[in-house]
Image: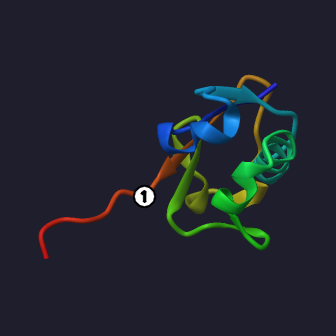
Amino acid sequence: MPTVRIPSVLRKHTDGAAKVTAAGGNVGEVLRAVTADHPGLEEQLFDGDSVRGFINVYVDDEDIRYVSGLDTPVERDSEVALMPAVAGGDG
């Protein structure tokens, strides 16, 4: 089953777990399964049917924006990494 890496800022929604597993054949299915198990993540990850713009998603180090988005296939041993965008600086 694919593993999803949860960034520290979102772990309060997974009872502190840094990694969770979820079934699915593509990224969208995996993320929907994760949010079904951890409902607090849904609002953090999704804006309607799309992943929020400030959340970057990688499958085995490939940015899904440059593959097939939420339709990007995952394998049983795939790792899906959620990475909040980092921004800021001295204005």
Report whether residue 19 is seen. yes
Say which quarter of the image contains residue 22: top right
Residue 47 percent coordinates (x, y): 70, 71
According to the picture, the residue beneath numbered tag 1 turns out to be 85
| Relative vertical location of residue 76 with respect to residue 50 in this rendering, above or below | above
Report whether residue 68 is seen. no
Q: Residue at x 75, y 56 (%)?
A: 42
Of helix, strand and loop, which one carries label 1?
Answer: loop
Tell me: 79 left or right of 27. left
Residue 7 percent coordinates (x, y): 51, 39
Q: Residue at x 78, y 57 (%)?
A: 71
Residue 37 percent coordinates (x, y): 85, 39
Task: Spot the residue most to the left.
Answer: 90
Residue 50 or 39: which is nearer the viewer? Answer: 39
| Relative vertical location of residue 77 with respect to residue 60 in this rendering, above or below | above
Judge the density around disc 1: few (<14), some (14-19), many (≥20) Cα neighbours within 10 Å: few
Q: Residue at x 76, y 38 (%)?
A: 74
Residue 80 percent coordinates (x, y): 64, 38
Residue 17 or 73: which is nearer the viewer? Answer: 17
- Quarter of the picture containing the C terminus is bottom left
| Relative vertical location of residue 63 with respect to residue 75 in this rendering, above or below | below
Say which quarter of the image contains residue 87: bottom left
